[in-house]
Image (spheres, rainbow, N blue to C red):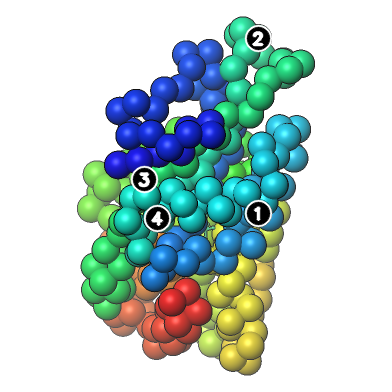
C-alpha cells in the first residue's frame, strides 16, 4: 500500500512521522475521510471546504490549494488501485519542540492513505439494519472541528462493539442525542418528518448529512433540524445514521429495544437509495 507523505508517495512501511509532530504529541491536527466511487471522489467540494474550515479554526495554514489536495487524493486512490473505497487525509500543525502554544514556524504535515471498501457488504448490512447503544457524550465543546483527537469516540465505539452494537449514540447532559461516535444520528417522527440535530459546535456537520438534507429537500420530504432525546429516538417510527463509510444505515434497535417494528424503515430505505444514486 502506498501513502502520500509530505510530498512523496511511499510504501506504508517507509512513511515516517517525526516523533515531535504535534499531531502525535498533542493531537494537534485535523482529518477528512472521503469516499471513492467508480474512481471518483464523492462530494469532494464539501470535503475540501470542511478541511479548510477545520484548519482555519485551529489557525493551521492550508498546506496546498484545495485543487492540489484533490489531485493528491485522486492520485493516492489511483496508486492504490482504489475504485471503491476511501481516502484518508490528515493535516497536522507540523514538527516543533514540545510546547503547548503554537510554534512560530511549523510546516503543516500532510499524510494521505487509501483503501478499498466492500460497498456491497455495506448494502447487505443496510438490508438488515444495525443496533446502536447509548453512551454519555464526554467530548469537548468544539466537535464541529474534524480533529484527530478521537479518544472519546474510540471509547464510545469500543463500548458499542463490546455490547454487540454497530454504533454508539452519544447523549448530552440534558438527555439529547448529539451524534454517533463516527456518524450523524437521525430519526423519523410520528408525522413522517426526518429529524436530525441542528448544526452547532456540539456535532460534526457531516458531509453525508449535508448531501442527504439536500436530496431529501429536493424530493419534497419534510425535514426538521432540531435535537431529539434518546427516549424520542426509541419511540421513533424509524431511525438511521449517516457517514462517508456507511452512507445511510437503518437503525433497528437502540439499547436493546426495537425501533418501529424492528426492521429498516421505508423512508430510510428511500433516502438510502437516493443517496447511493447520488454517490455513484
Ligand atoms: N467520521 N460525526 C462524527 C463524530 C464523525 O467522525 C463523522 C465521520 C461523522 C459523519 O461525517 P461524514 O458524513 O462527513 O463522514 C459524524 C469518519 C467517516 C471517520 O472518522 O472515519
Closer to viewer: mark 2 or mark 4: 4
Give how far across and how far down residue 186 sits, in percent. 51, 69
Image position of 53 (left or right of 146): right
Question: Residue 157's mark?
Answer: 3
Confirm whether residue 132 shows in the render.
Answer: no
Q: Is mark 2 within 8 Å of ligand 1?
A: no
C-alpha separation, residue under disc 4 versus residue under disc 1: 16 Å
> In terms of secondary structure, where does tag 1 sit?
helix
> In terms of secondary structure, where does tag 2 sit?
loop
Question: Residue 78's mark?
Answer: 4
Task: Tell me if residue 88 comes above or below residue 91 in the rendering.
Answer: below
Closer to the chain start, of discs 1 and 2, is 1
Image position of 161 (left or right of 224): left
Closer to the chain start, of discs 2 and 4, is 4
Confirm whether residue 274 shows in the render.
Answer: yes
Q: Residue at x 40, y 60 (%)?
A: 245
Question: Is 172 in front, or is 272?
Answer: 272
Give the residue at mark 1: 67
Amino acid at each position: 500500500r502506498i501513502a502520500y507523505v509530505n510530498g512523496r508517495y511511499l510504501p506504508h512501511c517507509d512513511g515516517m512521522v517525526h516523533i515531535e509532530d504535534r499531531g502525535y504529541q498533542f493531537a494537534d491536527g485535523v482529518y477528512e475521510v472521503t469516499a471513492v466511487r467508480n474512481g471518483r471522489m464523492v462530494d469532494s467540494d464539501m470535503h475540501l471546504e470542511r478541511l479548510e474550515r477545520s484548519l482555519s479554526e485551529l489557525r493551521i495554514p492550508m498546506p496546498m490549494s484545495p485543487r492540489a489536495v484533490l489531485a493528491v487524493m485522486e492520485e493516492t486512490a489511483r496508486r492504490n488501485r482504489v475504485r471503491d473505497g476511501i481516502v484518508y487525509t490528515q493535516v497536522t500543525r507540523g514538527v516543533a519542540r514540545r510546547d503547548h502554544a503554537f510554534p512560530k514556524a511549523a510546516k503543516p504535515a500532510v499524510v494521505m492513505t487509501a483503501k478499498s471498501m466492500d460497498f456491497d457488504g455495506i448494502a447487505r448490512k443496510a438490508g438488515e439494519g444495525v443496533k446502536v447503544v447509548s453512551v454519555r457524550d464526554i467530548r469537548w465543546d468544539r466537535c464541529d472541528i474534524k480533529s484527530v483527537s478521537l479518544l472519546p469516540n474510540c471509547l464510545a465505539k469500543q463500548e458499542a462493539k463490546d455490547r454487540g452494537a454497530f454504533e454508539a449514540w452519544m447523549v448530552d447532559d440534558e438527555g439529547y442525542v448529539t451524534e454517533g461516535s463516527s456518524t450523524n444520528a437521525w430519526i423519523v417522527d410520528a408525522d413522517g418528518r426526518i429529524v436530525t440535530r441542528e448544526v452547532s459546535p456540539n456535532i460534526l456537520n457531516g458531509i453525508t448529512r449535508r448531501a442527504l438534507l439536500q436530496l431529501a429537500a429536493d424530493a419534497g420530504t419534510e425535514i426538521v433540524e432540531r435535537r431529539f432525546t434518546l427516549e424520542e429516538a426509541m419511540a421513533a417510527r424509524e431511525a438511521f445514521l449517516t457517514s462517508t463509510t456507511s452512507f445511510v444505515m437503518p437503525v433497528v434497535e437502540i439499547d436493546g429495544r426495537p425501533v418501529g417494528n424492528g426492521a429498516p424503515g421505508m423512508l430510510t430505505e428511500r433516502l438510502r437509495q437516493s443517496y447511493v444514486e447520488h454517490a455513484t
